[in-house]
Amino acid sequence: MKRFSLRLEDELHEKLRVESFQTGVSINKIIGEAIEEKYKGDVGMKKEELEKSNKKMGLCQGRHNIEGITEYIFPQEVNPLDLNKLAETVHEALADCTKLDLYVTGLTVALIEVVNYAIKNNIALTLWHYNRDTGDYYPQPMATDLWKDDLREGGYI
């Protein structure tokens, strides 16, 4: 048996707590049974499904010219006040991504949306920042793929 940590919305946690109290079944068992039901007969995701895509992208097109970068998460003008549109755009760009090298072009609110998405979706993320002195980019690995070791140990990747 593997140890597993899970964050739940307060409302869902309360529903599970009430069900657990009413049935006398632990929350862990309720969640485990729900997961088993969803995946019964399915061994899990195949290695090739998990290794869908490694991407090298810029954050916002038009802010800086980055040699070798042709894809951008935000290829259009960005409204930093429309958080729903930012989240939608990030999802569209990264839905099939497992590893992302992201060249940071500013706009903190857009960057945070990408980092949040990477955390929620177990995407290995490295941010690349511009060094004005050398004219090169330097990497900043992020701890966004926290489940990678568990998936590897389980034989899924």
Image: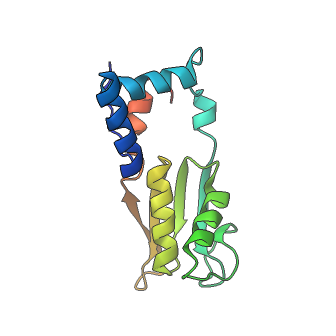
From the viewer's perspective, tell me whether residue 90 is left or right of residue 153. Answer: right
Percent across and percent down for residue 51 are 59, 38
Foreground residue among 78 and 16: 16
Foreground residue among 21 and 102: 21
From the viewer's perspective, tell me whether residue 101 is left or right of residue 73. Answer: left
Residue at (55, 73) in percent of width and height: 83
Percent across and percent down for residue 85 are 63, 71
Q: Is residue 128 above or below residue 45?
A: below
Asked if residue 112 shows in the view, the reply is: yes
Residue at (50, 81) in percent of width and height: 107
Residue at (36, 53) in percent of width and height: 143
Q: Is residue 49 above or below residue 80?
A: above
Quarter of the rendering occupied by the N terminus: top left
Residue furthest out toward the front: 22
Residue at (48, 71) in percent of width and height: 111
Q: Quadrant of residue 12?
A: top left
Percent across and percent down for residue 10 are 36, 51
Asked if residue 9 shows in the view, the reply is: no
The color scheme shown is rainbow
Residue furthest out toward the top: 41
From the viewer's perspective, tell me whether residue 39 is left or right of residue 129. Answer: right
Percent across and percent down for residue 84 are 59, 69
Q: What is the tally of numbered marks visible in this picture?
A: 0
Q: Quadrant of residue 74?
A: bottom right
